[in-house]
Amino acid sequence: MTSPPSLRISSAGRQASAGASKDSGEEWTAEDPDGRPIRIRFSRPNEYGVLDHIVFADDKETRNAVRVVPNGTGAEVMFVLLRTPDMTEEIFTADAEAVQRDLNSLKAMLER
C-alpha cells in the first residue's frame, strides 16, 4: 500500500519545505522555503502506487502526479513536473532542480 510519508515533504518544487506535520486524513502542513505556510493534500492510501498531491500556497493550487512502481526487489518513483503557462523558465528550472534534490534525498533515505 502506498501512502504519504511521515518524513520531510518537499513537493511542488520550490513551494514545499521540510518539517511537515500531518493535520488530519491526507492533509499536511509545512512551510515553503520563504517560511510561508502551505498545505499539502495527498490522495488516499491505495494499492496502486499513486501519491498524487495538491499544494495550497498563496491562494494557488499546484497539482502533482507521483507514482511508485514496483521494479524487481525495489521500486521506481516518478514525479511528473508540469510547466504552467504563467511559469517562467527560471521558476520551472528551479522547480525541476528542487524535485531532483527531493528524489535524490528520498533515494538515499530508502537505501539506508
Image (cartoon, helix red, strand yellow):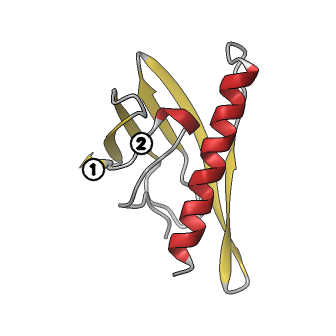
Residue closest to the far top: 86
With 49 as the anchor, is 81 left or right in this view?
A: right
Q: Determine whether, in the image, residue 101 is placed left or right of residue 31.
A: right
Crowdedness near tag 2: few (<14), some (14–19) or many (≥20) residues, C-alpha within 10 Å = many
**Quarter residue 87 falls in:** top right
Q: State the image coordinates of residue 21 (x, y, percent, origin top left).
A: 27, 49
Of helix, strand and loop, which one carries label 2?
Answer: loop
- Disc 1 to disc 2, how far (Cα)? 13 Å
Residue at image point 50% right, 65% down: 2
Looking at the image, which residue is at 36% across and 31% down?
A: 38
Q: What's the mark number on residue 17?
A: 2
Q: Which of marks 1 and 2 is in front?
A: 2
Q: In this view, does 94 lie above or below 4?
A: above
* Image location of residue 86, percent across then percent down: 68, 13
Residue at the far left in the pictured view: 23
User: Disc 1 or 2, which lies upstream in sequence?
Assistant: 2
The amino acid at mark 2 is: Ser
**What amino acid does circle 1 point to?**
Lys
- Residue 40, compared with residue 76, is above or below; it is above
The answer to whether any part of residue 81 appears in the image is yes
Of 12 and 14, nearer the camera is 14
Residue 33 appears in which quarter of the rendering? top left
Along the viewing direction, whichever of 56 and 93 lies nearer the viewer? 93
Reading the image, the residue beneath label 1 is: 22
